[in-house]
Amino acid sequence: MKRRVSLAATRAALAGALLSVLAGCAFLPAGMGGTVEKPKPAELQANPNLLGVRPAWNAKLGKVDFPLVVAVSGNVAAIAASDGTVVGLEASTGREQWRGSAGGPLAAGVGFDGSTAAVVTRGNEVVAFASGREVWRQKLHALSYTAPLVAGARVFVLAADRSVTAYDGGTGRRLWSQQRTGDPLVLRQAGVILAVGDTLVVGQGGRLVGLNP
């Protein structure tokens, strides 16, 4: 029994001595067995390339319950509200340049090229404006939830059935229509229609298609 107690006491003494040695090593200089303090990262300096942002102006238009599109051309920004209101604002000051109405709720809007603005109504019509004055409207053969693209004196409409139709921007005359076959599914959401150089790019199903405008 005495031997066992003596052995336990010896082990405890050795453990205590080892802890004392390790504790002493913690205060030794680097390279002599001591621990090295972790370097502290320097505080980040202000980025001179960052600019403070503040509102330049604000304008109230009305409720918008479709994907908001702000079409900017030159110094004029065209915006449309769900009640059919279409407004052109001076981009630098927010001052109203012109205002028009489609005469009913909108499903999508707005496209604008600096002279012609176009929207799509819930009555399934595309309506074009010049300086806020309605110049023409055409009945669509299918629903559309995508803001028209106005470019090159034309108005391009992407319908929910994935068809693409081009209208003359000044008269509303239908110029051509392109229908993708084999896709009966209709999506109640905005699609892709944009100009890339001289190519009209549209989203049809899971594909992007380039068309000669």
Image (tube, rainbow, N blue to C red):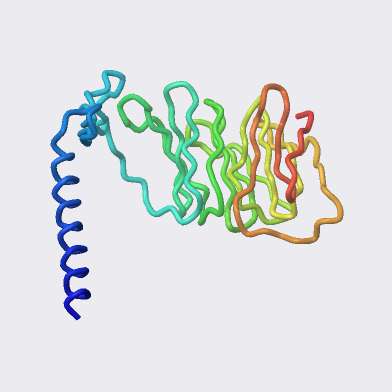
Picture layout, residue 206 above or below residue 213: below
Residue in view at x 31 percent, y 45 percent: 60
Q: Quadrant of residue 59?
A: top left
Residue in view at x 20 percent, y 74 percent: 3
Residue nearest the viewer, comparing 7 with 55? 7
Q: Residue furthest top?
A: 48
Picture layout, residue 27 above or below residue 188: above
Q: Position of residue 86 (x, y in %)?
A: 46, 42
Q: Position of residue 75 (x, y in %)?
A: 42, 22
Q: Position of residue 72 (x, y in %)?
A: 48, 29
Q: How many marks?
A: 0
Q: Quadrant of residue 128?
A: top right
Name the image quarter holding the N terminus.
bottom left
Residue in view at x 16 percent, y 33 percent: 28
Q: Describe residue 130's horizontal placement relative to residue 197 as left or right.
A: left
Residue nearest the viewer, comparing 34 with 40? 34
Residue in view at x 64 percent, y 47 percent: 191
Residue nearest the viewer, comparing 84 with 2? 2
